[in-house]
Image (cartoon, grey):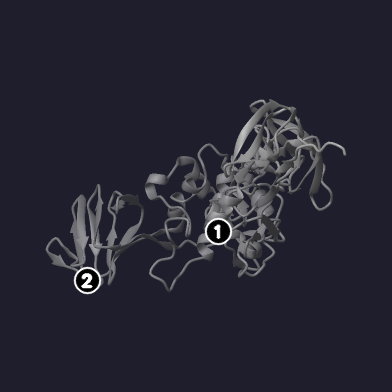
Amino acid sequence: MFLLDGRGWGHGVGMSQWGAEGYARHGFSYRRILGHYFPHTHIGIAGARDVRVLLAEKQASLRVGSAAPFLVVDARGRRVHLPAGSVLVNKKLVLSQEHLQSPLRFDPGAQPLRVAGGVYRGSAVVTAKPEGLMAVNVLPLDRYLDGVVPWEAPTGWLLQTYEAQAVAARSYTLATLRPNADFDLYPDQRSQMYGGVGAERYETNLAVGATAGQVLVWRDRIIPGFYFSSSGGKTSSVHDAWPRSHQVPYLVSVKDPYDYLSPHHVWPTMELPATLVADVLRLRGVTDMRVIENSSGRARAVRVLSAGGWKRFSGPLIRKKFGLGSTDFTVGALHLDAPPSRNLFGTQVRVTGWVRGLGRARLELFADHRWQTVRELHVNRSGRFSVLLAASRSTDLRLAYNELAGEPVALRVTPRVLVQAEGPKLEVFVAPRLPLQVQRFSRRRWQPVARSTGTFAGALGPGNYRVAIQGGASYVSSVTRPIRLHTKQLGP
């Protein structure tokens, strides 16, 4: 059984949003918050400019409209005034009986445009591509941020947090523009979540306006102000999260003491039975699993031991395969070795196994219809333990940690049987006292000739005999080796 514990939510680089809210609640200004998460940077001012956000692509048709009259201008400068309502644009680009040339720019009048079901400020550019129509929202940077900040930060937070979010988002936007592409930004997690007018809130608009033009700068360059939901207590260096990235002094791992506000600060422990690990990773016979940490203390990789030997998986791949919130996780292990298959009643059984990456585990056995703790385990430096148990009856054993437990392992106890023969006399002793049957081999099969419980003593006729012990649910039923009885010879 593997037990996975983890923290945080997201890639871990830059500003932890829950951590920023924690700092705000402890009296930090947005400038101090940003200075903590992006060390060696300062606040600069960037000029106003427009950005281009993808709204739809590969569409056979698009509906564009407004609650007030609006305008469309084609590639040749031809202008068509459209009444309030909506128009359906298809690949033929015919509007109001005018055949227009791609791209088409729709400009709003007194009301914003509605495109593909959403409402957006600024203009919308519709371009005919071989694979279908593409719609791109063109609008001023801060009007774009009005539709980003409320979707990236929950309601009810402090203004300082929204201000920090606005500056980080503005910096990220300007640092990642793509002037040679059809658009600059995706409307989702590939860039930033963008909801247009429908996302806007008064308090976040206020934060965007209060920080107008402000960006994070390092060596006279605007930096990408990466942010994410929750750090679990410590952020990640950029080269740890994305190994192909160059390490820079403003995207390093920093402590995040107030992230504890996050509902994802610490995850509930996840049980990962070895069979599940094998199934998810398409392996056979998984017996061990170890996390290799990077310099930020997160999982760079995970090594898994299976029937085919050790195999290495990247931390991000394990995160994806098991649906984890981040790569900030550890894997503890509980392993109970199978006891010997034959354990005689009354002897001592050595139970062994190992525990790694966990606190105090315990050995449990099943008795009286419930699991009972046998021993709190003390492990050596390698994590192994050894416990002596009395072989008193068959049961199941398991390892447990807090409220979690591994798969049961069977401990089977065989009764102790002593058989003695002298002439025609047979003596049998069974411990514990169990039902027994004396059988004689006759007519090519074993047939019962006597029954007893615990002991038997009596004279029998010549022949081959054996003893069958009925173990029931608590002991292993068994049969002794055949023994031959002879008629006792008298002296000369």
**Location of residue 407 (image quadrant):** top right
Name the spot of residue 419 as percent of width and height, x first. 77, 37
Residue in the foreground of this view, choosing between 415 and 311: 415
Q: Quadrant of the C terminus?
A: top right
Residue in the foreground of this view, choosing between 466 and 436: 466
Name the spot of residue 241 as percent of width and height, x first. 62, 61
* Residue count near mark 1 (Cα–Cα under 10 Å), binned few <14, some 14–19, many ≥20: some
The residue tagged 1 is 281
The residue tagged 2 is 101
Up/down of 25 relative to 78, above or below: above
Q: Amino acid at mark 1?
A: Leu
Mark found first going from the N terminus, 1 or 2: 2
**Residue ranking furthest to the right:** 492
Report helix, strand or loop for mark 2: loop
Name the front one of labels 1 and 2.
1
Image point 75% across, 41% down: which residue? 343
* Residue count near mark 2 (Cα–Cα under 10 Å), binned few <14, some 14–19, many ≥20: some
Image point 11% across, 63% down: which residue? 97
Q: Which mark is residue 359?
A: none
Residue 44: in sight, yes or no?
Answer: no
Image position of 234 (left or right of 156): right
Residue in the foreground of this view, choosing between 4 and 249: 4
**Residue ranking furthest to the front:** 492
The answer to the question of whether label 1 and label 2 lie on touching residues, with beta carbons closer than 8 A, is no
Name the spot of residue 427 as percent of width and height, x first. 77, 32
Up/down of 83 relative to 364, above or below: below
Image position of 8 (left or right of 73): right
Report helix, strand or loop for mark 1: helix
Residue in the foreground of this view, choosing between 184 and 351: 351
Alpha carbon distance from label 1 to label 2: 52 Å
